[in-house]
Amino acid sequence: MSRNDATAPVRREPAPASGKGLAAGTLGLFGSTVIGLASTAPVYSLAATLGFVVLAVGAQAPVVFVIAFIPMLLVAFAYRELNRDIPDCGTTFTWATKAFGPWAGWMGGWGVAVAGIVVLGNLAQIGGIYFWLLVAPDLAENALLVTLTGVVFIALMEWVSYRGIEIGEKLQNVLLGFQYLALILFTVFTLWAVFDGSAPAGSTTPQAEWFNPFALTSFSGLVEGVLLALFIYWGWDTCLSLNEETKDPKRIPGQAAVLTTIILLVTYVGVAVAAMAYAGLGTEGFGLGNEGNADDVFFALKDAVFGPWAWLLVAAVMISAISSTQTTILPTARGTLAMAVYKALPSRFAQVHPRFHTPSFSTLIMGIVAVAFYVGMTLVSSNILNDTILSLGLAIAFYYAITGYACVWYFRHDLFTSWRNAWMRFVFPLLGSLLLTAAFGFSVWDMLDPDYGYTVLFGVGGVFVVGVGSLLFGVLLMIVWSFFAGAKPFFRGESLNRDTAVLVPDEDLPVIRSVDGGI
């Protein structure tokens, strides 16, 4: 061997495609966790919800974040258990079909898809607004310019998702790192100011009472706060939708999901405590009880906390929204890919790019539908677009609850063969699903109020019409599709049932070293 041959870098080839054709062995635990965290858009989620949670429950905002975390963690155990047995990228769709049959499974898949489509439009809107707040603040009020910018962001993240999970994971490492840098600096600066006495009037040292659930005085406020908090935790299940592209797909995705929820809990509670201590809960000035600050707590505090570096927080919110745009496309595209593979959608959705090993047609369609939804809602009314994000909690609670119930029913024959199974496959998933079902029911009732949200449609709150209507629209689509010849094998329970061997990578398939080092 020549010297040149000996020192030449080794070129790593992509992992051979298997299962549905996706690139196996691409992600390790670190990469899966990064994508799970990025999917939640931590900076944007806090900016958009912290103020409203404080308005709903006052000083008990930190404990509400903890309460909302409980069903998330419990359902994460359900995801982990189901993924160990069925590591299929269809996740809720595949698992619910195997547990309950085709109709429940199809609606579970629809819940994942509709949540993704709704949030993509809102993420694009936020990305567009904050881009112009950063570059030319006067243009941030230009609805046409903001909308076009949002469409460009969806197209760019669509391209990243289309090109392969490798480039997406590397990009998310950078984007998530910037987000957490901004959050850490915000927390350090605000708490430092509180303890050295330089914080504005109304500030206070953190109080143990903020974590007292018995100090909550309004049940409706608690429900509203929990639903808002569910939104900021939502997204960790992206780890599971990438299971077929993950090294050790039966183990790592479930670990990443649980790890992601725990990291999010620490992040959200820590930042909430820091912001409340620094700004206080007053109804004037910087106070988090000031309704004028509720839309974006970070924007209200950025100059006071960061001074000339205030642009960092603006950039962090923008990056958070754009980052989540890409990671939201991933699970929706893979969910529809799986549905098509098992005949629950037209076969074109099952197309996988021969070079990039991504769900090419599903990815493109998700982007097109998201753009159409975003532009359509913007043309109708910006208030309708705002109502769509408030309604998102219904779709989230819907398909998370289905997943938890599916875990209990799928494993019903061995629930009590060990203490571990009793807790992990029965108690935790069932309790998490019951909590989410209760949140769904109470929220639907509250949303009937015409004063709920920004619009009134058909005499009730626009949030109710959008949230419940989007799920009912899925029922209509399912019924229509069931009459097509291509759908018969699925709805007759032939293409996917409890005994079907799902199309996933072979366990003995050789994999490359993952892009994050295979940790």
Image (tube, grey):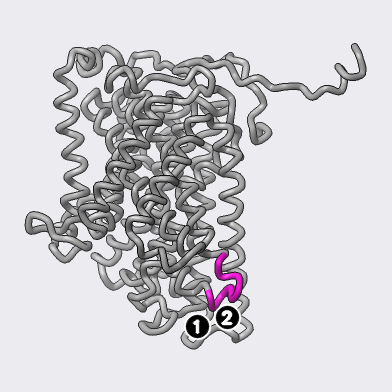
Tag 1: amino acid: Ser
- The part of the chain drawn in magenta is 303-311
Residue 219, by quadrant, is bottom left
The residue carrying mark 1 is 203
User: Is 382 part of what is drawn in magenta?
Assistant: no
User: Is 306 part of what is drawn in magenta?
Assistant: yes
- Residue 493 image position (x, y, % from top left): 24, 16
Number of marks present in the image shown: 2
Front residue (pair 417, 176) = 176
Residue 191 is tagged as none
Neighbours of disc 2 within 10 Å: few (<14), some (14-19), many (20+) = many
Per the image, label 1 sits on a secondary structure element best described as: loop
Majority secondary structure in the magenta region: helix
Residue 194 is tagged as 2
Q: Residue at x 28, y 22 (%)?
A: 345
- Verify CB contact (< 8 Å) between mark 1 and mark 2: yes
- Residue 179 image position (x, y, % from top left): 56, 56
